[in-house]
Structures are given as C-alpha cells and as structure tokens.
Image (cartoon, rainbow, N blue to C red):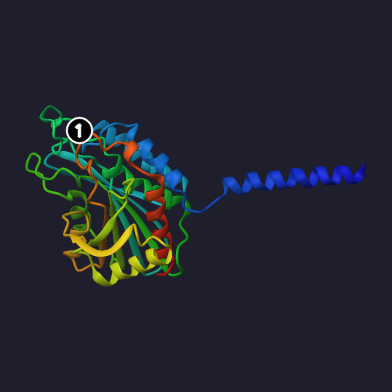
Amino acid sequence: MRTIKFVLLFFLFLIGSGCRSQTTEHNFSGESAYQYVQAQLDFGARIPGSSALLSTSHYIQDTLTQNNWQVETQDFHFMDVPLSNIIAKKGEGEKIILIGAHYDTRAVADQESDIDLQSTAVPGANDGASGSAVLLELSRVLELPAGAQVWLVFFDGEDQGHLNDWGWSVGSDYFVHQLNEKLYKVIIIDMIGDEDLHIYQEKNSTTTLMTEIWQVAAELGYDSQLIPEYKYAMIDDHLPFLNQGIDTVLLIDFDYPYWHTTHDTIEHVSPASLQVIGDVLVNWILTQ
C-alpha cells in the first residue's frame, strides 16, 4: 500500500513540476510574441496623438514593468501632436545595447490600389506591431551579458512621413538628440513578422555589426530568412543613430506586399517569423 502511495505521490510531483516549468519557461516564443501583436491591434489604429496609441503605450509600459524592467517615457510634441517614446532598461555596465522598434501606425493607407481606401488608417500588424511584439517578448525572456545594459526602446512617430509636413522617424530623431549616454550597439527592427520572411542586408547599416548578426542567424540555420545580400537602402529609425556615428543595423523585410495598405493585418503575420527574429536577437545579445 505504501508503494502505491509513493508512486502516486511521485506521479503528482512530476505533474506539478511540469506545470511549474511551463509557467517559468524563459525561451523566446514566437507564439507569445504573436499574442502581443494581436493585443496591439485590439486597440485600433495607433496614430500619433490618438487614444488608441495612448492605450497601447500604457499596455506596453505595464507589460515591461511586470517583466521587471525599469520603464520611463520621453514625452514631447511635434507639429502640436503629443508623442511619447517608451524606454525600458535592465542591467549594469558601460556597454549599452539598444534594441528599438516603432509602435505607431500610418494614418493613411496610401499604397492601396483602391483609391477609396487610401484615406483609411493602416491596421499595422506587421508595420509597427510585429517589432514591438518582439521587444515585449524579449522583455520576458532576455538574459543579459555580464557588464552590459540592454535598453528596449519603442519609438513614436516613425511612420507619418510626407503626411501634413511630417518627416520620417520623428521619435528616434528626438531620442538621439536627447541622448546623454554613449551607446555601444543599436539594432532597429521593423516589419519582421511577414509570413514569407526575407530580410536582406540594408545598405546604410554598419557592416561589422551586420556581419555579427548574420553570422548568428547562419549558425541558427536561419540563412534563408536573413539573406547575406544587399538589397535596399532604407529611411527608418536607424538613420538618426548612424548620423551620430553609432553602430546600428536595421532588420526589415521590405518585400512585404501589404505595406501601408488596409491588408496589413494579423493574418499576414507569422509566429514562425517572429521566432526567427527573437532567436537571433537573444543569441546575438549573449555574444556581446
């Protein structure tokens, strides 16, 4: 009888241990990141100055705080519109590694073939939410290298260029000009959730840093997603950093067919693609 009781207790222990391991799992999860994409979409179009973007900002800050990051906002105005960058910090040391993404969405779908839809706001599943989702999932799982800090920065006002006299990358430009610390390396991610992920090397990015990242991707078996060939020179949140002489790389899949259209929806975002980017970033950070 004691033997039966012991076996039963041991079986219950294994079940309990399994349950605990599931709740404390700290591997990057593309599925978890995908849920962060959906959570942002649920707020609606995240246009600068809108209530939807304010709600998204609060959601991002709450998530970061729950994951034990030090969170601050950088509030400012541009063209009389209130904007807010979100900055999450963790770790100690002189090396500051910054991973950034924008969390606003474009106010109009000006790449729509249907003229009647061009004044509609872009849902922004891939263009905005995917990068922010990866950052949120990183905040849950990231292990920091010794002697380094990691900053996760969510930029406002990236995606309104050529609308009402706005430029591109307003939030990151403001961030760089307020910066007092010396950054070690910067990675910007944008539109990285495409279900058919192909990220080419970007022509403006720092070559040595790009080589590091693509090497990690190749070692992980992701060389068909991160392709070691140049294709585009982009205007994005990486340029303000590069203009200040900071080593910076942009990871972007600009072959996304739903860019700045009403079809930039959750159906065209893949957890597998989010997994690729998360795995590469987690493993690259550990090499620093």
Quadrant of res 34: top left
Which residue position is annotated with label 1? Answer: 121
Quadrant of res 232: bottom left
In x, y percent, where is residue 96?
Answer: 34, 65
The answer to whether 268 appears left or right of 118 in the picture is: right
In x, y percent, where is residue 3?
Answer: 89, 46
Which of 106 and 170 lies nearest the eye of the viewer? 106
Which of 94 and 216 lies nearest the eye of the viewer? 216
For image coordinates 25% across by 42% down, the residue present is 104
The answer to whether 222 appears left or right of 5 in the picture is: left
Quadrant of res 16: top right
Task: Report the quarter where the C terminus lies.
Answer: bottom left
Task: Report the quarter where the N terminus lies.
Answer: top right
Which of 124 and 80 lies nearest the eye of the viewer? 124
Q: Residue furthest left?
A: 165
For image coordinates 34% across by 36% down, the residue present is 267
What kind of residue is marked 1? Answer: Ala
For image coordinates 16% across by 55% down, the residue present is 235
How many discs mark residues in the rendered view? Answer: 1
Q: Residue furthest top?
A: 116
Q: Residue furthest right?
A: 1
The answer to whether residue 145 is above or below residue 178 is: below
The answer to whether residue 114 is above or below residue 154 is: above
The answer to whether 144 appears left or right of 247 in the picture is: right
- Classify mark 1: residues with Cα within 10 Å, few (<14), some (14-19) or many (20+): many
The secondary structure type at the circle numbered 1 is loop
In x, y percent, where is residue 192?
Answer: 31, 50
For image coordinates 65% across by 47% down, the residue present is 18
In x, y percent, where is residue 264?
Answer: 26, 38
